Amino acid sequence: PPPGDIDMLDADELTALAENRGGIRISLFLPTRRGRAEINGNRLRLKNLLRHAAHALAAEGVASRQVDTLLRPVRQFADDPHQRGHPSDGLALFVGPDTIRVHRVPIRLPHLAAVGNRFVVRPLLPLLGMNARFFVLALNDNALRLCEGGPSGLQEVTLDGLQLAVWQTIPRRQPRLHAFVADRGGPTSRAVF
């Protein structure tokens, strides 16, 4: 995916991944951290996850040359500064003999490397309920703001026209001022609160 994109997978895409069987299938899930200082940490965590996948493949009897061939695209992804510079909350990678799919997702994923004859998609199931949109209306005495929310956060909606004009012309209550005079018993000991 292009840098910075968050991939919202729908049920059909998850089903297609789950049904992709045969040969070696590697599923990698990584919780990522946002922020410039975390970019190298995310890269190191991905490389450690690759090391776990390589060990699992070797334990299954896969030749080291085939392991290198399978994991090479993921290593290239990990070393590409344009790709790793835009983390989301989670990263899911699916690697097979003929495919690599990278998904940046807005959910925290487990730190997991799975090797088998099919892809593991269970950590991505919470995405199925995240395509909903919602609105937040923020009101105070001096302003009205409308924000649209979705899987990737909130963004303010520009308000033009009557709604904003009406809000700004509604009379407001003036704040009440309360004052006390406290006398502590001496001629110069008065205080006003």
Image: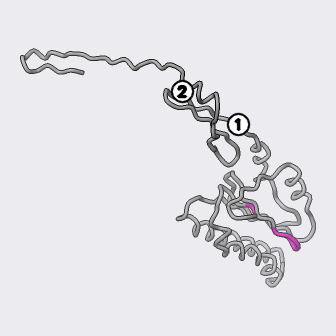
Q: Is residue 114 above or below residue 159?
A: below
Residue nearest the viewer, comparing 170 with 63: 170
Q: Secondary structure at mark 2?
A: helix
Q: Residue at x 63, y 28 (%)?
A: 163
Q: Residue at x 67, y 41 (%)?
A: 149
Q: How many marks?
A: 2
The magenta segment: 92-100
Q: Residue at x 92, y 64 (%)?
A: 21
Image spot of residue 142 (x, y percent):
49, 29
The residue to which callout 1 is attached is 134
Q: Quadrant of the N terminus?
A: bottom right
Query: What is the crowding at mark 2: few (fewer than 14 residues within 10 Å), some, or many (at least 20)?
Result: some
Look at label 1 and name its amino acid.
Phe
Residue nearest the viewer, comparing 105 with 97: 105
Which residue sits furthest bottom?
A: 65
Q: Residue at x 81, y 84 (%)?
A: 65
159 left or right, relative to 6: left
> Mark 1 and mark 2 in contact (Cβ < 8 Å)?
no
The residue to which callout 2 is attached is 168
Q: Secondary structure at mark 1?
A: strand
46 left or right, relative to 116: left
Please name the predominant secondary structure of the magenta segment in the image: strand
Measured Cα–Cα span from mark 2 to mark 1: 24 Å
Image spot of residue 72 (x, y percent):
76, 78
Image spot of residue 32 (x, y percent):
63, 60
161 left or right, relative to 124: left
Q: Is residue 98 magenta?
A: yes
Image spot of residue 168 (x, y percent):
54, 27
Disc on res. 61: none
Q: Quadrant of the C terminus?
A: top left
Image quadrant where residue 94 sits? bottom right
Look at label 2 and name its amino acid.
Gln
